[in-house]
Image: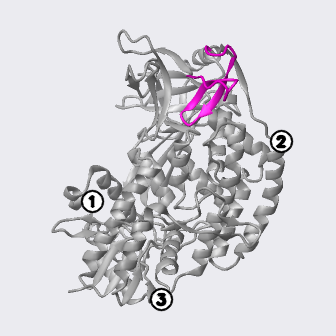
Amino acid sequence: MKAKSLVIVESPTKAKTIGRILGPEFLVTSSMGHIIDLPRRKLGVDVENGFKPEYTTISTRKKMLSSLKKEAKAKDKIYIATDPDREGEAIGWQLKEKLFKDKEVLRVEFHEITSSAVAEAFKKPRDFNLGMIEAQIGRRVLDRIVGYFLSPLLWKKIARGLSAGRVQSVALRLIIEREKQIKAFISMEYWEMEAEFKRPEAEGSFLAKLAKIGDEKAQIKNKEESDRLVEEIKGKEFRVQDIKKIEKKRFPEAPFITSTLQQEAFNKLRFNAVKTMIIAQQLYEGIDIGNDNPVGLITYMRTDSPRAAPEAINEVRDYITKNFGVDYLPPTPNVYKVKKLAQEAHEAIRPTLITRPAESLREFLTLDQYELYEIIYNRFVSSQMTPSRYLQVSVSIMADQYLFTASGSDLVFNGFSAVYNKNDEAQEKNKIPELQKDSVLDLLKLIPSQHFTKPPARFSDSSLVKALEEEGIGRPSTYAPIISTLIYRDYARRIKGYFTPTELGFKVCDLLVEYFPKIMDLKFTALMEEELDGIEDGRVNKLKVLEDFYQPFKVSLDFAQANIKKEVIVTEEICVQCAKPMVIKWGRRGKFLSCSDFPNCKNSKSITSGVKCLEPNCGGELIERHSKRGLFYGCSNFPKCRFISKTLPSDKE
């Protein structure tokens, strides 16, 4: 049967899955993403006439454009089935305007790639959402204005090839500010005191911590104070002053949204944000689960709403009743609070079919796919279960003026933690035996311990995404690209899972904060995100948003262009070719030495680490290098010596 309709999606994998669902009457193909964009080598935005964008066909998409046009000629209808977000809406609109003005073009939207969802969407095609398109254009224009004008300033001050982005620069500032806090932090010594107790003539012991001395909080500054306290306390009589037993509940957490999925995937699986989104995209677009039957396993993975469809709620409640029993099912469905700035365009990230637990799909999934799907599946099921219940026991123990406290908990009912336990907190800790008020306890030993205050931790993928979300910076689709850009530009490096800003990152951030404080302000950036959301729902005029942004930006830009001077760092090293001083410059691969008489003298030299190459009889030193895969160290005698290492030998554990 010859296909009567053409369906266009973004990716070949998605096209394959949807093609299997729709059958031979539909030809499903992909556009491979955007087909038009702003030009690469000029601004492409008419800032004097309504900020009109000048779109051009992406060179690598020209053949695709011709192919799509050819495929559409004999088709009765054309369906655009791109992703249900601003980017997807814009891609579809571009196709309609560029290729199919004389054709009937229908927009279909679905949030999961399953037979029922796709079939329902094709029964109810809709018009294009012009608000979403306007918001996408507004963001693209804003980002182009910032990047196009700020990047050359970085070239002038630091080095060619650098870039500045409206949102990525603010994310960099978060990393830089945290690093400054760490460097300024002064560690302080302190001690804690624990006591191990038992009931007379009873088995087992428990620990209690020194909480107060008299009416004051116990603060032990050094070993001398600790030793003195040990001597004062060890001969005292210890008596139970008070016992409290309270039943507490731990409630399940909401199903995943994009930010919480990225956070949990890092915390549980050590996946970075980019890896998480790549795997989630695979699960969404379709996995072959036997008999050449690709199906989407999860709903759309770019979302900021924790809500789930009523049908999905009903299905999971039935599943809980059948597999766990009525005690695990709340009387009414659990409802989760929506964040203030959530767009609520989509559902939460959940499995498309509740009767497909991860274990049943193990043979069809890679290990990474299996692990991510498992936490998505379990989190959704647990979100509609009853709370866990614990009996928390708190004990106060007095010895003269010294107050020791202990607490422990016993699991009464596991509830949702039968399926999903975020941090394994459900395990019983420091089990407290049955005690009587005023009873005397035996002191087995006092346990003093030395500690030092710690600086705030560097950001990880998890904590950076959380910070961006809390500050209202970026949106679900932007978190992973923000992080990958910072790494790719070598403004920050991911070391053992945590971001360390580079010297280059400090230079870029400091320059932007000095000359463009508004652009680098977190609250201002969050306000811009709100206004872009306002364009989508019709509350805010796009032209006004762009004008209000551009006019003060232009003032700062003109001032910066007039005042920024090239930084020259002269070294003591002399050029071997012309005897003039060598200066430090920045290139795409990091710092290097260049003759100060450039371009008359083009001599340059790598800056070595001072660490000898481990290759026998080489005599070279290791040089810091950068590639698309990140930082590595290569021999200064390359290509004669091809020794490379991911770390300096002195850093290896």
Side of 581 where 18 appears, left or right: left
Q: Is residue 453 magenta?
A: no
- 561, above or below 526, in the image: above
Q: Which residue is mark 2?
A: 563
**Mark 3 or 2, closer to the camera:** 3
- Residue 310 shows up from this direction: yes
Q: Residue at x 38, y 63 (%)?
A: 382
Q: Is residue 154 above or below residue 118?
A: above
Give the residues in magenta: 576-605
SS at circle 2: helix
Instruction: Specify the quadrant that holds the C terminus.
Output: top left
Residue at mark 3:
102
Q: Please, what is the three-letter code of the amino acid marked with disc 1?
A: Ala
> For mark 1, does the 10 Å Cα neighbourhood hold few (<14), some (14 to 19), or many (20 or more) residues?
many
Give me the C-alpha separation between circle 3 and circle 2: 53 Å
- Indicate whether 462 appears above or below 433: below
Q: Quick one: 479 or 161, which is closer to the camera?
A: 161
Q: Earlier in the sequence, mark 1 or mark 2?
A: 1
Vertical position of residue 558 compared to residue 47: above or below: above
Determine the secondary structure under disc 3: loop
Residue for point 77% across, 62% down = 550
**Residue underneath mark 1:** 358
Name the kind of residue labelled 3 in the image: Asp
Q: Earlier in the sequence, mark 3 or mark 2?
A: 3
